């Protein structure tokens, strides 16, 4: 029960970050409004200077008085260094600063954050030397369940430095693999295409052959993921992407009736509906979601209320796109319904207008 409570609190904090990020412009405001609440949520007494030390001195070489924003001390042992930046800043250019601090202390973990993105480091490659690559990275406004599980390991109550460090190596390489595969889904490299074509094409792999197979590989990978999403996640939600089931009387009692019998709801439009259900499953009761199809676009609604439409899906011969019901009526072009999963944070912002 406590674990579920912390999950809910993390998601609530993520929503707060999304709502405040345009209004916060300084590092100090980021610290007090976003970063300190995150560590407080994890059970640390952020107002106890013996446990959560602000402006911790970490002298670097001949430089004296170098300070890291926060240090966490557990059982009288310096455990975590935290370098904080304003939410308006990207983190990539600041890891070298934390790298210097890490080598001058006995801390085994360090965190770089701007209040929305968090990067966790340790010394897997060389003892007492912070790795260049974090073993855990997440955006608190768009958390995945697997990331929440890892974050909870850092709560004061659950904190076990040996367990964290021992699992960090596996986590680091799993994340690296996921990142690599995401890149290949978006733009398959020549080496990746060549590897796959070796198993399906017996001819010589010339440059012309590789160029021919590149779009085939990209399309095939996206179709595989789409099928996995529909077969497994949709099944878990007790939904279906088959037109026959949607046309059944039982399904029609839960989904708004279509007045114009000449309108045919396609498999792809139903995939959009299913994908939105998947994204919002942790936020609302998905039985509150409905759709309405018309000649111009496919509408996903909350509570079958046309004033509470969440997104509209357009599928013309020239392009596919979604429109979000936010202040800017954001238009996003997509190549497949699977790509909607990338915009979870934006869709959550829409749904929170109505709940």
Image: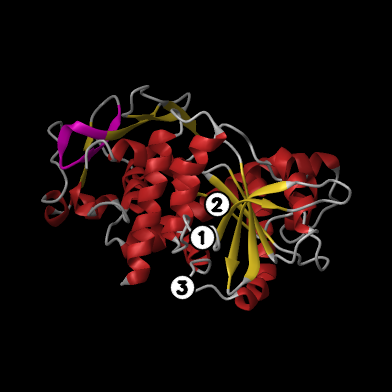
User: Which residue is rendered at x = 83% and y = 66% of the image?
Assistant: 126
Q: How many marks?
A: 3
Report which residue position mark 3 lands on.
157
Report which residue position mark 2 lands on.
138
Q: Position of residue 252 (x, y in %)?
A: 14, 49
Q: Is residue 307 left or right of residue 347?
A: left
Residues shaded magenta: 297-309
Task: From this view, report whether residue 158 is shown above or below residue 219.
Answer: below
Q: Which disc is residue 110 wearing?
A: none
- Give whichever of 134, 72 is nearer the camera: 72
- Give whichever of 266, 173 is nearer the camera: 173
Q: Residues within 10 Å of mark 3 (few under 14, many from 20)?
A: few
Residue 19 visible in the shown view: yes
Residue 337 visible in the shown view: no
User: Which residue is rendered at x = 66% and y = 46% of the image?
Assistant: 183
Query: Spatial distance from mark 1 to mark 2, Cα to Cα?
Result: 7 Å
Q: Quarter of the image for the N terminus: give it.
A: bottom left
Report which residue position mark 1 lands on.
147
User: Which residue is rendered at x = 16% and y = 42% of the image?
Assistant: 303
Q: Residues within 10 Å of mark 1 (few under 14, many from 20)?
A: some
């Amino acid at each position: 029960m406590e674990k579920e409570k912390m999950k809910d609190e993390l998601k609530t904090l993520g929503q707060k970050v999304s709502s405040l990020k345009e209004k916060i412009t300084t590092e100090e405001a980021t610290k007090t409004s976003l970063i300190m609440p995150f560590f407080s949520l994890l059970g640390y007494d952020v107002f106890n200077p013996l446990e959560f030390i602000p402006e911790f001195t970490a002298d670097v070489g001949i430089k004296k008085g170098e300070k890291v924003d926060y240090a966490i001390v557990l059982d009288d042992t310096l455990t975590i260094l935290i370098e904080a930046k304003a939410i308006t800043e990207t983190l990539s250019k600041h890891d070298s600063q934390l790298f210097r601090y890490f080598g001058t202390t006995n801390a085994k973990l360090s965190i770089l954050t701007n209040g929305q993105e968090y990067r966790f480091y340790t010394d897997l490659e060389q003892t007492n030397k912070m790795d260049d690559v974090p073993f855990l990275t997440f955006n608190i406004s768009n958390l995945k369940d697997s990331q929440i599980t890892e974050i909870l390991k850092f709560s004061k109550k659950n904190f076990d430095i040996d367990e964290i460090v021992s699992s960090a190596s596996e986590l680091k390489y799993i994340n690296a693999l996921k990142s690599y595969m995401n890149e290949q889904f978006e733009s398959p490299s020549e080496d990746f295409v060549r590897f796959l074509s070796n198993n399906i094409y017996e001819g010589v792999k010339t440059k012309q052959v590789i160029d021919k197979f590149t779009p085939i590989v990209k399309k095939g990978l996206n179709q595989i993921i789409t099928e996995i999403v529909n077969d497994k996640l949709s099944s878990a939600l007790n939904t279906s992407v088959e037109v026959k089931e949607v046309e059944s009387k039982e399904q029609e009692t839960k989904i708004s009736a279509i007045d114009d019998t000449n309108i045919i709801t396609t498999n792809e439009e139903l995939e959009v509906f299913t994908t939105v259900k998947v994204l919002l499953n942790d936020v609302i009761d998905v039985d509150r979601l409905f759709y309405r199809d018309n000649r111009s676009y496919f509408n996903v609604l909350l509570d079958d209320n046309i004033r509470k439409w969440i997104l509209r899906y357009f599928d013309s011969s020239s392009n596919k796109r979604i429109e979000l019901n936010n202040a800017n009526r954001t238009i996003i072009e997509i190549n497949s319904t699977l790509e909607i999963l990338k915009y979870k944070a934006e869709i959550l912002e829409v749904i929170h207008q109505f709940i």
